[in-house]
Image (cartoon, grey):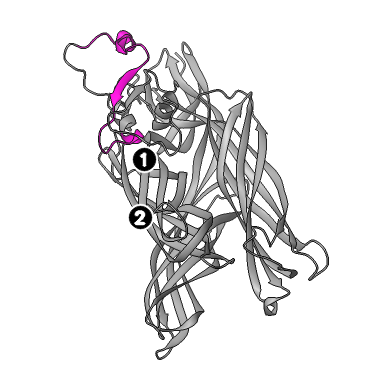
Amino acid sequence: MQPITQNKKRIKVQHIVGNGTAQVDIVRNIQLPARARKIVDIHAEIVELDYEIIPNKIIVKGALHKQIYYVEEGDYVVKEFTIMREEFTDFVHIQGARPEMEALLDGHILFVNTNPANGEFPTDLLYQVAVLAVDVKVVEMMTLDVVTDCYGEGISVQKAPFSVECLVGAAEKQSTISVEHMLCKPARKIYDMDAVCRNLDYEVLPGRVIVRGTLHKQIYYVDACDDTVQAQCYDNEFSVVLDVPGAKPDMEVYTKCRMEFCEAKLMGPQPCNMVKANVILQVMVKVTELTKMNIVTNVEGALVDRCRIRVEDIIGRKCHQENVNQTIDVNAPMDVDNMLVKNTKNMTACVRNVSYEKICNKVIIKGVIHVQVYYVACNCEQELRETSADIPFTTVVNFDCINDDTMIRCRERVEYTDAKIEGAPCQTSKIRAVAILEICVCAFQTKDFMVVTNVCTNGTCNTQAQQIPQPKPIPKPQPKPEPKPEEKEEEVCPTGGYTYEVKAGDTLAKIAASYQTQVPGITWQQIARFNNLYAPYTLNIGQILRIPCVAGKG
């Protein structure tokens, strides 16, 4: 018998241990610095997402950052009130999770609203309801030598297409940012300082990644005149260069920024209006490459070593550029009046509220781009002012072979911004805002693969045929006494699904976690759709919910 010849390729992949969703409700009263006659707008984002893994459970931590734009009683000028941090903590149960693994988090704001706490304006006390969802995926990085082909007498080789993101490299780096700022009023002392990273972007060069972003700081200080605590915000651009051997411009990059330390100190004898802010950032990147190949899944007629892995099987990835432009009137809304523009200084933009819909081999992406334009006014002693607007956009990306089980991941980047006045200086109140977006869409499915890592030649197999080495598959729940045959499990489910009575402290995420045994893979979003529930997904004690018998139904 001729010896067996095998070809191998080393890959680094993320084995998916499990996933889940934490639903977080943030309900609180907000004290404004002045009485407001109306709320103009609310901008909110999830910041500082972090996690801790304990056996079979992921502790999710983060904060909600908000900017509330309101009109003060007796005034017609829009004012801004920033709440840097509303911290939250929740957990997700994922069987098989261990502390040495990694969790990937993706936060979404499902609903946020503020109303007068006493029911009417004007008021300085608001009642807030915010509903957040944090998607959690636990992964384990695995390095495998997979068999891509096999030749030999008397054997039959089975193959399968394999399309996944393989890890090229990862890096992290600390960066210290020290900037001097001038306060609006002399300060007796610094009370506190908060800082968050915003608008992370990147550029890939051969062997390195440049991460750029905005450091948003809020300094709280004690006014030297009346001892009141004042707040003042500053934004600073930053960039960090990280070495990642093997990185190339066409590869995918995942970035993360964490605040390690921040402080602010007065720079002179009290009272003083000069302050120095010091921040230490921890910047992390992970570079991946889309790898497509055929892998051997079994060899009949020979003993093999095999390993079960669960990965994101990539169906396709496409990028599209969207040109977004709109005219902004600095006198709209009507809280500003008779303002004329001399020239524009600069413009910033970020993408918000992105959603998608799958129809007929197409993915429709919708969202808004929030622009802030800084301009010089002709009156008011030519002072620098700011105006903002939310510009909606819709993009259609064509995909083949997508279905109800296909999952979508979108990444949006602002590639270019520009703002110009429409008309002659000091004769117009209109500004044309232009932005070019890059929208990349990845379509994928979570699949289990039984990959062959070695074909036995001359007793080279570690154990008996079809052994499954580490990582071990997620253990199945122990069978109950007098179990029914596995093929008849679905018959136990009542017609129309299981029923569940809502109890105190329940959320959709916790209910979904409790049904993972009966309905593996069930998510809180599926339960919501099955029961025709919509944001803010309010549950009432005693409410009866139906749980579908099969994950993905409803």
Image-quadrant location for residue 317? top right
399 or 211: nearer the viewer: 399
Q: Is residue 300 above or below residue 108?
A: above
Residue at horizontal 35 percent and vertical 20 percent from the top: 466
Q: CA distance from mark 1 to mark 2?
A: 14 Å
Question: Disc number at residue 320?
Answer: none
Evaluate whether residue 152 shows in this view.
Answer: no
Q: Which mark is residue 22?
A: 1
Tag 2: Cα neighbours inside 10 Å, few (<14), some, or many (≥20)? some
Q: Residue at x 28, y 33 (%)?
A: 541
> The N terminus appears in which quarter of the rendering?
top left
> Which quadrant of the view contains residue 206?
bottom right
Based on the picture, tell me whether residue 42 belongs to the magenta stretch: no
Residue 118 in the image, given as x and y percentages of width and height = 39, 54
State the SS at label 1: strand
Residue 79 location (% of width, % of height): 54, 65
Which of the image's four quarters has the C terminus? top left
Asked which quadrant contains residue 552, the reply is top left
Q: Does 434 sit left or right of 493 as displayed?
A: right
In the visual, does 474 lie left or right of 480?
Answer: right
Which amino acid type is shown beneath numbered disc 2? Answer: Glu
- What stretch of residues is rendered in magenta? 483-510
Task: Identify the amino acid type marked 1.
Answer: Ala
Quickly name the residue at label 2.
Answer: 87
Residue 143 is at least partly visible in this image: yes
- Whether 480 is drawn above or below 124: the answer is above
